[in-house]
Image (tube, grey):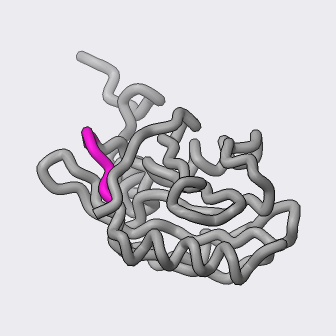
Amino acid sequence: MADRRPTEDNPGILDKLIGYLLGNEKRNFREVHIDASIVEEIICIARESHPKEFAALLEGKITDEILTIQGLIFLPGKSSSQGAVMQTFMKPLITGTVGSVHSHPTYNPHPSNADLYVFSKNGIVHLIIAKPYDEYSLRAYDNRGIEISYKII
């Protein structure tokens, strides 16, 4: 008889459910689309927050292998010019969160080691916007910190 205990490669049903509720389960998509109004909101918030960082969760859904980001979810937290922290434990359990977005108050849009840790634990796609806070300074990354392409729709 096979051993049916949960492992890292074969999580149990409870682990799968918790992963789904936290937005950490693996979901397949081949394209990322970001609603243009969301990009404008990210740009405005990043500019208003400067020189502090801002952070929010991304709300979206996958349909026909296209991940569409349609909203932002803001949680209580703290921010400075060195980083932004969200209290993710306050996230409602039933949400359509798919990742996160935050700003860098420098011209560097690449994830830091702390960013990579957050990416690996929270969602499947993450955005970073850097100075000068425009659509050209917005980058998307997967949960391993690998840059991925996206379309603004």
Give the magenta-colored segment's residue range: 28-33
- Residue at 32% of width from left, 28% of height from top? 4
Taking 55 as reference, is 148 above or below it? Answer: above
Q: In the rendered image, which quarter contains the C terminus?
A: bottom left
- Residue at 46% of width from left, 60% of height from top? 22
Query: Percent position (x, y) of residue 138?
Result: 55, 55
Looking at this view, is 83 or 42 the one in front?
42
Q: In the rendered image, which quarter contains the N terminus?
A: top left
Count of numbered marks: 0
Query: Percent position (x, y) of residue 92?
Result: 46, 78
Q: As drawn, which residue projects farthest toward the left?
A: 64
Decide if residue 29 is on the left or right side of residue 138. left
Query: Percent position (x, y) of residue 121?
Result: 57, 48
Q: As drawn, which residue projects farthest toward the top?
A: 1
- Residue at 33% of width from left, 53% of height from top? 151
Decide whether residue 91 is among the magenta residues. Answer: no
Query: Percent position (x, y) of residue 129?
Result: 62, 59
- Residue at 37% of width from left, 52% of height from top? 14
Decide whether residue 29 is among the magenta residues. Answer: yes
Q: Looking at the rendering, which quadrant does residue 120 occupy?
A: top right
